[in-house]
């Protein structure tokens, strides 16, 4: 009886894991300087591979390059999360400890901040800048236009793009 595509796929991933997990872990350990976090990210890399529909031809022809690409994306996410956490904790330090949220609330806040950062990260840089100036700084469109050197109409168009983007992400439209 011939192997099913799923069985064949699983065997291919098992082979990738067996042949390259140790190399990937070592590569990540060099990047992170932390064997435990490297082990976590190596596992996450293979979880991503498993959650993909199927390994691409590139994964099979150039497995280390393919795994390194996935791992690099996870590294960027990891470093972004660390930066968000550092910034949040720095702001938190400016408040009396009696006003700090519980540990559970802090984790929920950090998760929300990460989601916002991901949403903003998908915007073009100039659109993101205009959106943040309007939403975080409270600037008007004419003020933003002067600051970024664009027309008011362009600023309004950027704001509309950013708001549409947020709406689509929140409501799945």
Image (spheres, rainbow, N blue to C red):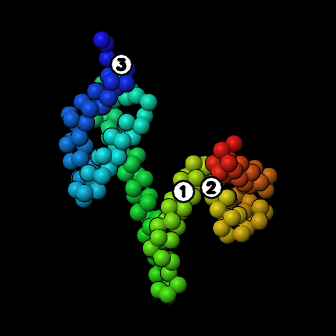
Residue 16 sits in quarter: top left
Q: Is residue 4 above or below residue 172?
A: above
Q: Taking the image as drawn, is residue 62 in sight?
A: no
Q: Looking at this view, name the residue that lies furthest to the top.
A: 1
Q: How far is disc 1 from disc 2 in space, using C-alphas?
A: 15 Å
Mark 2 touches mark 3? (CB < 8 Å): no
**Quadrant of the snapshot with the C terminus:** top right
Which of these two is toward me, 12 or 24? 12
**Quadrant of the snapshot with the N terminus:** top left
- Checking the image for residue 115, the label placed there is 1
- Checking the image for residue 4, the label placed there is 3
Residue count near mark 3 (Cα–Cα under 10 Å), binned few <14, some 14–19, many ≥20:
few
> Is 118 positioned to the left or the right of 30 in the image?
right
> Is 134 positioned to the left or the right of 112 in the image?
right
Residue at image coords 44%, 30%: 53
Which of these two is toward me, 1 or 36? 1
Q: Is residue 94 above or below residue 39?
A: below
Q: Looking at this view, name the residue that lies furthest to the front.
A: 1
Residue at numbered disc 2: 128
Residue 37 in picture, x, y percent from top left = 29, 56
Answer with mark 2 or mark 3, whichever residue precedes in sequence.
Answer: 3
Q: Nearer the viewer, mark 1 or mark 3?
A: 3
Residue 40 in picture, x, y percent from top left = 30, 52
How many marks overall?
3
Residue at image coords 20%, 34%: 19
Q: Secondary structure at mark 3?
A: loop
């Amino acid at each position: 009886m011939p192997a099913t595509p799923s069985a064949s796929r699983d065997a291919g991933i098992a082979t990738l894991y067996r042949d390259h997990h140790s190399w990937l872990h070592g590569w990540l350990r060099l990047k992170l300087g932390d064997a435990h976090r490297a082990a976590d990210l190596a596992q996450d890399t293979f979880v991503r591979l498993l959650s993909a529909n199927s390994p691409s031809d590139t994964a099979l022809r150039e497995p280390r390059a393919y795994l390194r690409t996935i791992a690099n994306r996870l590294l960027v996410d990891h470093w972004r999360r660390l930066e968000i956490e550092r910034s949040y904790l720095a702001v938190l330090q400016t408040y009396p400890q009696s006003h700090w949220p519980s540990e559970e609330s802090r984790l929920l806040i950090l998760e929300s901040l990460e989601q916002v950062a991901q949403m903003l990260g998908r915007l073009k840089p100039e659109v993101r800048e205009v959106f943040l100036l309007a939403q975080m700084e409270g600037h008007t469109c004419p003020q933003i236009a002067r600051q970024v050197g664009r027309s008011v109409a362009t600023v309004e168009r950027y704001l509309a793009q950013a708001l549409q983007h947020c709406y689509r992400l929140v409501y799945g439209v």
